[in-house]
Image (spheres, rainbow, N blue to C red):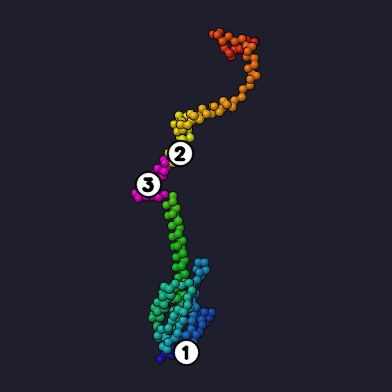
Amino acid sequence: MTDYAEEQRNELEAIESIYPDSFTVLSENPTAFTIKVTSDAGENDDTVETILKFTYVEKYPDEPPLYEVVSQENLEENDVEDILTLLQQQATENLGMVMVFTLVSAVQERLNEIVDQIKSRREEEKRRKEKEAEEAEKVAFQGTVVTIENFLLWKANFEQEMAELKRKKQKEEEQAGKAKLTGKQLFERDHDLDTSDIQFLEDAGNNVEVDESLFQDMDDLDLDEDDPDFDPLDLGSDED
């Protein structure tokens, strides 16, 4: 007849010596304890961790112990579910033998795999970002692929810009033409120009001052205005 209590005590002592820093007894009747399981350090010293709780049933090890994940660190929900599935599988395979060390070792191995998966996900994410950057650079280098839709859009914008430039140029030419009107065009635009010019001459004549001393010696000049060769401009040359 199997002495379940003796086997449980012996295993408990062995577990305490194997995991002295992570083993904690919670109760003696029924016997319940926790073991903290931490993965090996991964890249950048990443680790994942879980605390497993085991409770002996009366006929352990012929019946599996009760187990649960009471806490975890850096694990996702699906990781916890995988650990529980793994514990169930290992417990079924090891019925009839003390199995806590086997169960903890299986979880330890699983945590190490998770750390490796974290590393793989990071590397995959890095490669994805690098690929996206390369694709973006390639698109920038090659330019936009021409399609019927974007060509028609470009054509409409181009024609609109050209029409706007043409209107602007015509407006500038009209303004320049107004600034360079001929005398005739100015006269046609302002019919008062003729009278304004006459008025200007009259005003100027009324304001002209004559120096009469310049004409005092005019009577002494012998002017023969009937002479066909008479030239008023040569009067001064006779004295030379």
SS label for mark 3 = helix
Label 1: how many Cα within 10 Å (few below 14, some 14–19, many 20+): few
Q: Of tags 1 and 3, which is closer to the observer?
A: 3
Q: CA distance from mark 1 to mark 2?
A: 103 Å
Q: Nearer the viewer, residue 18 or 208?
A: 208
Amino acid at dot 3: Ala
Amino acid at dot 2: Glu
111 w.r.t. 141: above or below: below
Which quadrant of the view contains residue 215?
Answer: top right
Disc marking residue 156 = 3
137 w.r.t. 126: above or below: above
Task: Report the quarter where the N terminus lies.
Answer: bottom left
At x 48%, y 83%, the residue is 33
Res. 151 visible in picture: no
Task: Report the quarter where the C terminus lies.
Answer: top right
Q: CA distance from mark 1 to mark 3?
A: 86 Å
Main structural element of the magenta stretch: helix, strand or loop? helix
SS label for mark 1 = loop
Which quadrant of the view contains residue 133?
Answer: bottom left
Amino acid at dot 1: Asn
Res. 22 visible in picture: yes
Which residue position holds label 1? 29
Q: Of tags 2 and 3, which is closer to the observer?
A: 2
Which residue position holds label 2? 172
- Residue 229, percent from left and from top: 55, 9
**Residue 229 placement, left or right of 189:** right
At x 65%, y 19%, the residue is 213
The magenta span reads 143-167
Q: Which residue is outermost to the bottom? A: 1
- Residue 45, percent from left and from top: 52, 68
At x 39%, y 83%, the residue is 95
